[in-house]
Amino acid sequence: MKPTRRRFLSTSVALTTGGLAGCSGSRSEISGDATETATSAPTESAMTDRSAETVISVLGERVPENMAFDTAGNLYFGITAGEVRRLPADQTGATGLTIDATDQLGTLPGAIGVEIGPDGIVYAAVATQDNRSGIWTVTPDGMSSQLVEISGFPNDILYDTGRDRLLVTESSNGVVYTIETDGSRTTWLDDDRLATESFGANGITRDSDGTIHVSVTRAANETGRVIQAPVQDDGSAGEASVLFAGGEIFGADGITARAGHIYVAVNSQNRVIRISPEGSTSVVATADDGLVFPSDVLFGVGEQSESLYICNFANRSPEDGAILRTQM
């Protein structure tokens, strides 16, 4: 059932033009109103003089796209050819590893966004544009099955622990779905600013006060966006607003949150951009640090909590596929 790499790319145009998934994270309270225009140009941060270390090289056509940590510090990542893999927590501080250092947990028709539930079940977004497209699960014993079918391009996944549900972005139509663990689906957020003529809602994350943030990859005039929406007491989405919009994040893919800031993997620009609560931007890492079409960013857990992990999707140069790590 696993499609060839050629088939996957031919059915997913956005792999070469717009980017893919994101990740979950935490972030402190955001204050103030954002506008639809960039509030400042990005500035080079101190981090750009540090080259990121390569944790895992993923060579060939088995390209990594998205990451997730469990509470024990194990690192999970999806490979677009249809694998979910895990790097043990005691290896996440290592460098120079190969795919052989990881455990293959399951085989799927494809794998874009990944997320880990509190019970050890891995959730993966599959975007094959046929009846296999949707959210799949991989149990701790390696059994994989489709939880729910989603047409279009299901992309990133956030596990909402407090409500035992998933929030899933769909990039073709620009929407965020709620997926219950029984597979039922409802629309959580349908906002015109999540949809574009090219590739819309992508990465999804949550800050420390529970606000949900969604990246929009390719908006008009070569801009990207980050949309934010509070979660109401009943779990529904509150009124959405724009945290940031501008050319600095054109190609916005995976996002994560830390200490009041949103970190964005800007795939087509080979950069990671940090957005402040006030909407200003700074450059965290660039191609000079080893970034090749970065599709996801995520802070580590435990001893690696000050490490920022970056996923090199490297779809046009698979020999550069890797998961990198840099210290904040």
Image (cartoon, grey):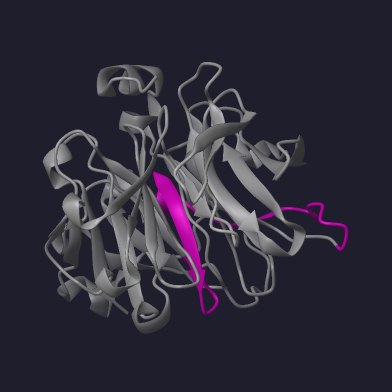
User: In the image, is residue 259 part of the stretch drawn in magenta?
Assistant: yes
**Does residue 108 appear left or right of residue 270 in this picture?**
right
Q: Is residue 88 magenta?
A: no
- Please tell me which residue is depicted at 23% across the width and 62% down the height of the picture: 324
- Quadrant in the rendering for residue 201: top right
Q: Residue at x 46, y 44 (%)?
A: 113
The residue depicted at 28 percent of the width and 70 percent of the height is 92
Q: Is residue 227 visible?
A: no
Q: Is residue 246 visible?
A: yes
Q: Position of residue 102 (x, y in %)?
A: 26, 55
In the image, residue 45 above or below residue 20:
below
User: x, y (%) of residue 50?
Assistant: 17, 74
Q: Magenta stretch?
A: 233-262
In this view, 149 is above or below 264: above
Q: Can you tell which quarter of the image residue 59 is in?
A: top left
Closer to us: 200 or 180: 180
Tell which of 87 and 192 is nearer to you: 87
Left or right of residue 75, residue 91 in this image:
left
Q: Is residue 132 left or right of residue 111?
A: right
Which corner quadrant holds the C terminus? bottom left
